[in-house]
Image: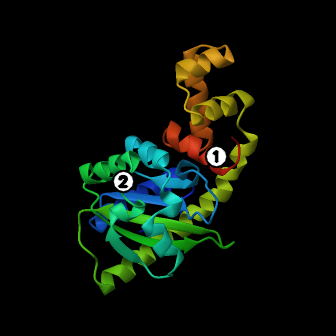
Amino acid sequence: MNSSAVQTEYEVLQLMRQCTVQFGFSHFMIARVPFGEQQRFAERLVLSNWPSELVRNYDSAAVFQVSVLIERLRQTKLPVFGATRSLLSAPGTAARDTVDALFCAQAMGNTFAVTLHTTHGEAFAALLSGARGEPDRAETADLYLTLLQLFETLERTFEVGASARDKLSMREIECLRWAAAGKSSDEIAIILGISAYTVSSYFKTATRKLDSVNRMQAIARAMRMKLI
């Protein structure tokens, strides 16, 4: 894997896709590890290929910070492997059951997870999910090293992307803020007194400036950068 020339988060996304397939998984996710505060999952999500419906429902379930898997990652520096439903909390709620059903529908039965740290000590969880079984010791070491290299590459893009703070216009920030609040393009157009076409245009430019692949990722990055 040649990651030395990677400059953007989109390029890291492509490398993560390759890594996921190479090791026999189907889905990946990188997010900041929550420690105590009740911050939404969507605000902590950095990179993933989870379907938007799954991200939306998992965020609504509000179980990331209290999930079994995250608690296990807090207590060890070693990789963790287990059922993906360990990303949920205790059973019994409709929201949890909906997410569990989506995990099953996506064939995300098992998850390999590790905690990775930035040079400043901030903790991130890197997860690979799919239908495959637990990797053996040699493959676990290979997988961990690969994720570590990818995360180091991703960390470089954080500083590159920081310049976006000075590039976004107030209108672009307003559109992202209202979208994060759950408003549709038509609703945002009415609120801001502009056309839906103009709103769409603002989303496109904001997504490009934030080096994102879609509106949801742009919103997540804007939240992470405390722009909205």
Report the amino acid beneath label 2: Gly
- Using the image, tell me which numbered label, if any, was put on residue 112: none
Vertical position of residue 206 compared to residue 195: above or below: below
Q: Quadrant of the N terminus?
A: bottom left
- Mark nearest the camera among 1 and 2 is 2
Sequence-earlier tag: 1 or 2: 2
Q: Residue 224 placed where, x, y %?
A: 64, 51
Cα separation, mark 1 vs mark 2, equals 30 Å
* Rendered-image quadrant of the C terminus: top right
Q: Is residue 109 left or right of residue 175?
A: left
Mark 1: give few (<14), some (14-19) or many (20+) Cα within 10 Å: some
Q: Nearest the camera: 95 or 136?
A: 95
- Reading the image, the residue beneath label 1 is 223
Q: Amino acid at mark 1?
A: Met
Instruction: Identify the residue at horizontal 34%, vertical 46% (top origin).
Output: 98
Q: Quadrant of residue 181?
A: top right
In terms of image quadrants, where is residue 36? bottom right
Q: Residue at x 62, y 34 (%)?
A: 176
Task: Residue 104 in the image: state x and y as whole percent.
Answer: 26, 53
Q: Residue at x 43, y 68 (%)?
A: 69
Q: Position of residue 208 (x, y in %)?
A: 58, 38
Furthest toward the bottom, the residue is 137
- State the image coordinates of residue 203 (x, y, percent, origin top left): 57, 30
Left or right, residue 182 beside residue 170: left
| Number of residues whose C-alpha sits closer than 10 Å to that of mark 2, classed few (under 14), some (14–19) or many (20 or more) | few
| Mark 2 lies on residue | 92
